[in-house]
Image (cartoon, rainbow, N blue to C red):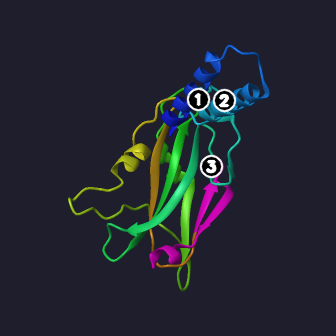
């Protein structure tokens, strides 16, 4: 998508450069459109400028974006898959993880401050991190996303990752997001029953 936008942007810029006539309303509109496309291309960059003071940033959760100071987790989609545990299902949360700091970071540390809960007949149970079942070739279908979560992330870079939780039943899953003092600052509910049908 980035390449397509870049080519479109360059093409529009080249068309504008070839005209030798005086400025008209049509050319002004073309320049305005080109400017908008350039802004979209630059905002979709997959890296940020590493910030030596990233650890001092306030931690927030808003609209599927969990900013934990040195790292930001943007949750993009979710699904329910078969778990590697027999007769169980797993909640899979896809996210883009960005390292905001000037040092390598371990994105999997997020499990210390992000937890999933599901009620049963008597309790509100914390779910364990899990894995999905292997495909027909014996491979993990989410391997590249698992690697994204468990490999050290370079400063300023973004990687695609997944968080997986083993489900106990088909009741709603409540995922909590905590700050450095382990106080909940955000909650997201996932109605897994609809995706288990």
- Disc 3 from disc 1: Cα separation: 32 Å
Residue 178: percent from the left, percent from the top? 63, 54
Outermost front residue: 21
Percent from the top left, x then y, of residue 25?
79, 28
* Magenta part of the chain: 174-197
Q: Residue 194, can we see it? A: yes
Q: Residues within 10 Å of mark 2 (few under 14, many from 20)?
A: some
Say if mark 2 contacts mark 1, CB within 8 Å.
Answer: yes
- The residue labelled by disc 2 is 34
Q: Which residue lies at the image location 56% right of the left edge and 33% below the top edge?
A: 45
- Is residue 191 highlighted in magenta? yes
Q: How many numbered discs?
A: 3
Q: Is residue 156 visible?
A: no
Q: Which residue is mark 3?
A: 66
Q: Is residue 180 magenta?
A: yes
Pointer 1 local density, CA inside 10 Å: few below 14, some 14–19, many at least 20:
some
């Amino acid at each position: 998508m980035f390449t397509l936008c870049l080519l479109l942007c360059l093409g529009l810029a080249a068309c504008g450069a070839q005209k030798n006539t005086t400025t008209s309303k049509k050319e002004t509109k073309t320049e305005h459109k080109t400017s908008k496309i350039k802004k979209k291309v630059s905002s979709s960059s997959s890296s940020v400028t590493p910030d030596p003071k990233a650890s001092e940033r306030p931690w927030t959760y808003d609209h599927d974006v969990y900013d934990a100071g040195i790292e930001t987790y943007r949750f993009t989609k979710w699904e329910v898959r078969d778990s590697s545990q027999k007769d169980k299902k797993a909640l899979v949360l896809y996210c883009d993880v960005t390292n905001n700091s000037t040092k390598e970071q371990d994105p999997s540390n997020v499990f210390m401050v992000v937890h999933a809960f599901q009620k049963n007949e008597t309790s509100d149970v914390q779910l364990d991190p899990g894995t999905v079942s292997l495909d027909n070739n014996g491979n993990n279908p989410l391997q590249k996303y698992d690697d994204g979560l468990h490999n050290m992330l370079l400063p300023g870079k973004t990687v695609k990752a997944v968080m997986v939780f083993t489900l106990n039943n088909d009741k709603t899953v409540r995922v909590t997001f905590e700050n450095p003092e382990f106080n909940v600052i955000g909650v997201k509910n996932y109605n897994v029953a609809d995706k288990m049908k």
